[in-house]
Amino acid sequence: MHSIWQHTGFHAAPHLTVIGGGLVGLFTALHYKRTFPTQRVLVLERGPFPSGASVKNAGFACFGSPSELLADLDREGEMAMLARVHERYQGLLELRAELGDATIGFEPTGGHELYRHHDPLYTRVAERFDRLNELLRPLFGRTVFHWDPQHLSASGMQGVAHLASTPLEGGLDSGKLMSALLAKAVGIGILFRPSAEVVGFEEGSQAVLIRLASGEEIHSGQVVVATNAWTQQLLPHLDVRPARGQVILTAPVPDLRIKGTFHYKEGYYYFRDLAGGILLGGGRELDIDGETTAEEGTTPLIQDALETLLREVILPGTNFRITRRWSGIMGLGPTKVPVVERVSERVIAAVRLGGMGVAIGIRVAHRAARLVEGA
Ligand SMILES: Cc1cc2nc3c(=O)[nH]c(=O)nc-3n(C[C@H](O)[C@H](O)[C@H](O)COP(=O)(O)OP(=O)(O)OC[C@H]3O[C@@H](n4cnc5c(N)ncnc54)[C@H](O)[C@@H]3O)c2cc1C
């Protein structure tokens, strides 16, 4: 039996329950609670703290490399490509304004895309580099990308023929970001329940009945599902595929010359300097089937490829030591457009953020919160 204090303090039925305590889940809860401060808002997170891609990513504050944007242009046309860049860049500005650059460890280090010798990607990008800049100029009010031979030679990389750079990209600290966001959410009265895995829910005429793995049941007025890569476990009809990304981190490297965030091979590889060492991720294209999994883990195939890239291209002739290996799971779909929609009268999905959730998470959450408010 719960006491009256347990009931009023913790157990009374929430108006809104958000399932998943990542960037999207916490921002959805925050936006909604700000609009309705007296309503009860609960976030259920299955991990002991946020445990998804929001705390496993590379911390790039980016909006797309030249090769990615040109591929999007070919596939979807100018309007769609520019709308996506706008969404990502505005999202980053909103994120920085909401939490503060110092708090999230944002540094405007500049971002780069590298092309190796005889790389057909370089030819494709170089041919339309000026056109891409022309298209982007109205969004940013300035030239976005430039060729950067000085930065390339200063970086000490080997076998890289060209570097395209933008000063508008940067890196941030996803650990600081997520702890500040969680503190903010809890600070305005959102109830955050870790170790609370949801195994299913049923919608009734008055409320949604949420079932936890512990056997507990919660009645909630509305539900937002923000479980990203794990969405199919709760909403099997939504097209969200898990996609694992493996990451390695080196110990500090004396006189490290790599500075900033780097994209390589159409975004399949990404690296940056972090705490004097290199964080490097990618390699999914080597085993797309094997990496289409919601299970965390690393494989020798991809770990070897990452180490080879470090040894041969990023840190040639340098002794480095890997201090950490991890993986995170993205939620992908047939397009790069996230799913933010009402899936039934009381349930909304805000999922499928692909590899850009740091940039677009806050805006996806805003749209989800507005859908709840419109109910
Ligand atoms: C390796 C890697 C590198 C990346 N690098 C970048 C980058 O540099 N820049 C960028 O913009 N984006 C990057 N991303 C993408 C970005 O991290 C994600 O798009 C973003 O974090 C998604 O946020 P989310 O809140 O939707 O999902 P998540 O952060 O995954 O949150 C979902 C949460 O739901 C919880 N959950 C799942 N199922 C249940 C359940 N049944 N019950 C309760 N809780 C549940 C999970 O534990 C998790 O905490 C990267 C992703 C990966 C994997």
Image (cartoon, rainbow, N blue to C red):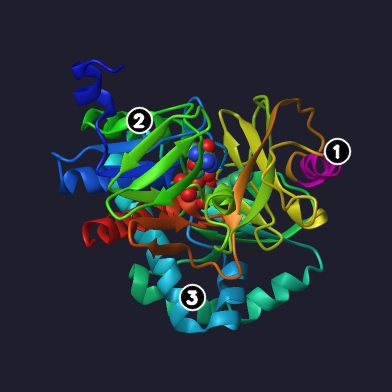
Residue at the disc numbered 2: 192
- Secondary structure, mark 2, is strand
The type of residue carrying mark 3 is Met
Mark 3: give few (<14), some (14-19) or many (20+) Cα within 10 Å. many
Q: Nearer the viewer, mark 3 or mark 1?
A: 1
Residue at the disc numbered 1: 300
Q: The N terminus is located in which quarter? A: top left
In magenta, the rendered stretch is 300-313
Residue at the disc numbered 3: 81
Does 276 lie within the magenta span? Answer: no
Q: Are marks 3 and 2 in contact (CB under 8 Å)?
A: no
Instruction: Work out whether 374 lies above or below 138.
Output: above
Camera sees residue 168: no
**What distance separates the C-alpha of mark 3 from that of mark 1?**
36 Å
- Taking the spot 35% from the left edge, 76% from the top edge, the residue there is 138
Tell me the quarter of the picture where residue 12 sits: top left
